[in-house]
Image (cartoon, helix red, strand yellow):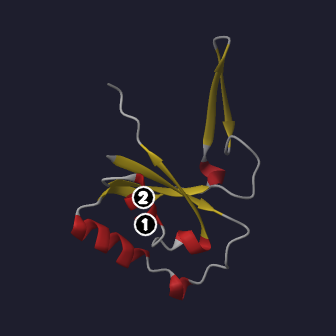
């Protein structure tokens, strides 16, 4: 099964410390094990566009969908046997300390 990790910022998390950011080790370990299918950072929210179609009218606005202090900073896609395994892997991601990680199973179209 595939799981999406939404990597989010969190104003209540411990302060970011570059010397504690072991993302390269986390990625290398998962790629070696074959559990990581994809992942990357996202460009800053200031560069985002929100797209809506309402009554046939296209509405494109700058920025994220909602005003928030917290935002999605990146993503990872894991290949795991269970959500518990995906949660265990997410717990080792540095953003589990510096932000928060939402883990969701990818729901394939049948």
**Residue for point 30% across, 67% down:** 30
Alpha carbon distance from label 1 to label 2: 6 Å
Residue 110 sits in which quadrant? top left
Q: Horizontal and vertical percent for residue 3?
A: 40, 49
User: Looking at this view, is 93 or 38 the one in front?
Assistant: 93
SS state under label 2: helix
User: Looking at this view, is 19 or 91 the one in front?
Assistant: 91
SS state under label 1: helix
Tell me the number on the disc at residue 84.
2
User: Looking at this view, is 82 or 108 the one in front?
Assistant: 82
Q: Residues within 10 Å of mark 1 (few under 14, many from 20)?
A: few
Q: Horizontal and vertical percent for residue 84?
A: 42, 58
Q: Are marks 1 and 2 in contact (CB under 8 Å)?
A: yes
**Residue for point 69% across, 58% down:** 70
Q: Is residue 102 above or below residue 48?
A: below
Q: Disc 1 designates what residue? A: 88
Q: Horizontal and vertical percent for residue 64?
A: 67, 45
**Residue for point 26% across, 66% down:** 31
């Amino acid at each position: 099964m595939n799981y999406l990790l939404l990597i989010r910022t969190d104003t209540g998390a411990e302060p970011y410390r570059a010397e504690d950011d072991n993302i390269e080790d986390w990625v290398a370990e998962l790629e070696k094990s074959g559990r990581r299918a994809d992942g990357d950072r996202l460009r800053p929210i200031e560069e985002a566009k929100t797209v809506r179609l309402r009554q046939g009218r296209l509405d494109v606005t700058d920025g994220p969908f909602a005003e928030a202090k917290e935002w999605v900073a990146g993503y990872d896609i894991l290949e795991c046997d269970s959500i518990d395994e995906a949660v265990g892997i997410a717990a080792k991601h540095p953003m589990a300390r510096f932000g928060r990680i939402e883990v969701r199973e990818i729901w394939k179209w049948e």
